[in-house]
Image (spheres, rainbow, N blue to C red):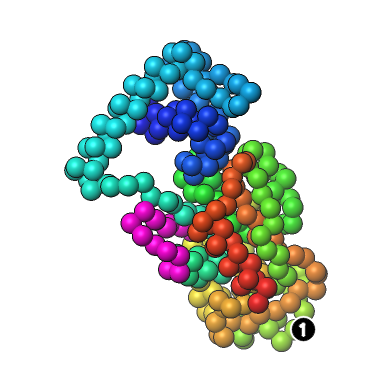
Amino acid sequence: MKLSHLRYLTEIAKTGSITRAAQNLYMGQPNLSKAVREMERDFGMPIFKRTAKGVEPTQKGRLLIEKSAELLEQADSIEREFFGVTEKKERFSAALCGVEYCIPVFEKTAIGYEITSSFSVDFFRCDRKTALELVETGEVSFAVIRDYSGNEYVSSVIEKKGLKARPLAEGKKQIITEWHSNICQKEKVGENDLKDFTEVYIFGSKDCEAGKSISVSDFFSGCRVISGLKNGFMFISSLDHEIIGEEICIKDLSCDDKVIDWLVYAEGKRFIGAEAEFLNKLKETIRL
């Protein structure tokens, strides 16, 4: 039994709704429902019953929630006295995979937002698998994940996990290479032009390794590798231009493939406060 689980129960009882409780707890409704089912299994009894107005505790569930409230009050008192925790914080958190252009917008939103003692911001650069796990467990509010394969990653991975995804931004698929590269003077680059080149890619951003490849931790590390690698390339989106230095050559591809950056979140998630402001600012940046 975890204190966080007891908080789940008291919040559901207070709101009379699993959906509203999930929003107040900054987690997905499916994850909260799953946690309740697991607690009911562990306790060997139903904790809530459905009514026309939502959910309400069963008789034994009410007793459990009353005891939980007492325990949580004691735990909160200990936190205030010994750890200086005075109030609940609004949390703005995201996992970002391969979308470095989002980070400046994220940081400006945090700085520009009315940051007080009741507000906290964090973001994680990580691979796609970790980003989805963080959304699943409710450790982040949402993830922004780049996909070079169109809708394939959404249909084959994201939706199977019970998560929701919607296109946040769409860019033109391009590559970057070093100025002295054999392909830098070409107007457009085709697949055959790249067969003897080394692909640089961000770790965890693709499902399989390329024939000749170098895996890097983040976009900027990839740019540094490319700048010193004569016959190397890295796929990018046209949305990345603002964060690419002049020492890198950007080339169009002969194909017209698109790059989609997906906003991934738990079912029932509502974007409010700083989260909504970030998404609006990001859309404005993309339009510019």
Q: Residue at x 59, y 45 (%)?
A: 269
Q: Residue at x 55, y 32 (%)?
A: 18
Quarter in which the N terminus is drawn:
top left
What segment carries the magenta color? 111-125
- Residue 273 percent across, percent down from the top left: 51, 56
Q: Nearer the viewer, residue 192 or 33?
A: 33
Q: Quadrant of residue 180?
A: bottom right
Number of numbered markers: 1
User: Badge 1: how crowded within 10 Å, few (<14), some, or many (20+)?
Assistant: few
- Residue 124 percent across, percent down from the top left: 46, 56
Q: Residue at x 59, y 61 (%)?
A: 279
From the viewer's perspective, is residue 225 above or below residue 69?
below
Horizontal side of 225 relative to 254 (left or right) equals: left
Residue 124 seen: no
- Taking the magenta stretch, the answer to whether it contains residue 269 is no
Q: Of helix, strand and loop, which one carries label 1?
A: loop
- Amino acid of disc 1: Glu
From the viewer's perspective, is residue 189 above or below residue 113?
below
- Taking the magenta stretch, the answer to whether it contains residue 124 is yes
- Residue 152 percent across, percent down from the top left: 73, 50
Horizontal side of 49 relative to 73 (left or right) equals: right
From the viewer's perspective, is residue 254 above or below residue 247?
above
Q: Residue at x 39, y 62 (%)?
A: 115
Q: Nearer the viewer, residue 253 or 243?
A: 243
Hey, which residue is sitting farthest right in the picture? Answer: 255
Identify the residue position indicated by label 1 in the image.
187
Q: Nearer the viewer, residue 284 or 253?
A: 284
